[in-house]
Amino acid sequence: MSVCVEIRQLYKTYTRRKWLLGATEKVPVLQDVSLSLWQNRVLGLVGESGCGKSTLCKVLLGIEEPTSGTVVVNGKNAVRVSREQRKGLCRDMQAVFQDPYASLDPRMTVRQLLSEPLDIHGLYKNKAERKKFLSELLSSVGLLEAYLDRYPHEFSGGQRQRICIARALALDPKILVADEPVSALDVSVQAQILNLFQDIKRERDLTMLFVTHDFAVARFLCDDIAVMYRGRIVESAPSEQLFARPLHPYTKSLLAAVPQVGKPLSKSVSADPGVHTGSVTGCAFAPRCPYATAACRQVIPILEQAAPEHACACIHVTKENV
């Protein structure tokens, strides 16, 4: 088993302009993020809204440029590539976004939407071959060939997301980035789409980065899980190992907040104190952590291995006390 994507010490900072004051402010979104996507495995990226999950996806896909750090995809530096190399990376790595309504051009039919990536990469130029390919592609995501000449507004949210998945699979990618692809759907439809992702993973041997804020979804689909808080990875481990024994206080709080029949919701952390800027020192979770000490507010914890295949960024979690 090899590494398909290697992200090392990735930083992304945006500049916010204060028009009335005539000044600017640096807002760090990703801070020292390091992740590995292993071949034929699904890595779940979990965290609350605004923690930087979507920004990480955009940097990985080349939509945004990182402030610093490296992104290596199949042995190639994805940060500094030529236009032709970027085109090749785009074929190897495709995305499914959160909102299926905004992902599809309402002026294009399903046939045009699915044909566009094929035209860009010069695939299936023969009319008969393309017709057969598109029919099989729709069938693989549970849709009928008759839908090819319909427009996006004629479909439900779940059907639109299936079209988005079909478009992502049209180039037979090796890596799929799914940015909260079920959060905008009804619960019953979510289950269908998750089962579809499970089938795709098994049949196509895909490597997948699956972004979600729902631990139940992550447990169902993901082989490994990385937990993000305020732009930093605070814990990463194989899925079952993380659920069996979470180490970081933030991960424990998230798992305790998952609703369970007959169990009251936990109130183990305080409310989010607001957006942190670059002037904050120490652990970003310290203001909300019930175990925080003075040292937590002075030292930024480093993501280190605390147990076999289990890394945690907390000064109170070490190999000695795990």
Image (cartoon, rainbow, N blue to C red):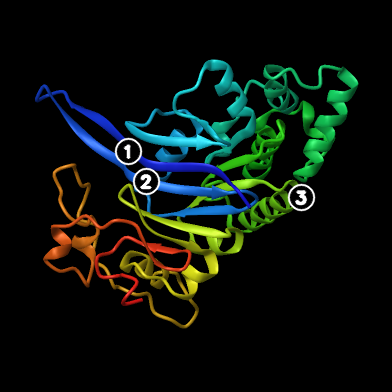
Where residue 235 appears, as percent x and y from the top left, is: 39, 60
Place residue 107 in its image quadrant. top right
Q: Is the residue under label 1 in contact with that under label 3 (CB below 8 Å)?
A: no
Residue 4: which quarter of the image? Answer: top right
CA–CA distance in space, label 3 to label 1: 35 Å
**Label 1 crowd bin: few (<14), some (14–19), many (20+), radius 10 Å:** many
How far apart in space, not on screen, are marks 2 and 1 (Cα)?
7 Å
2 and 1 marks in contact (CB < 8 Å): yes
The residue that label 1 is drawn on is: 11
- Asked if the residue under mark 2 is in contact with the one under mark 3, i.e. CB atoms within 8 Å, the reply is no
Amino acid type of the residue tagged 3 in the rendering: Glu
Residue 79 drawn at (x, y percent): 44, 28
Which secondary structure lies at badge 2? strand
Which amino acid, mark 2? Val
Label 3 or label 1, whichever lies nearer to me, is: 1
Secondary structure beneath label 3:
helix
Q: Give the Cα separation between the discs numbered 3 and 2.
A: 31 Å
What residue would you read off at disc 2? 33
Taking the image as shown, residue 227 lies to the left or right of residue 92, namely left
* Front residue of 273 and 59: 59
Which residue is at 45% across, 34% downward? 58
Secondary element at tag 1: strand
Residue at the image position 61 percent from the left and 40 percent from the top = 175
**Looking at the image, which residue is at 62% across and 46% down?**
207
Specify the amino acid type for callout 1.
Tyr
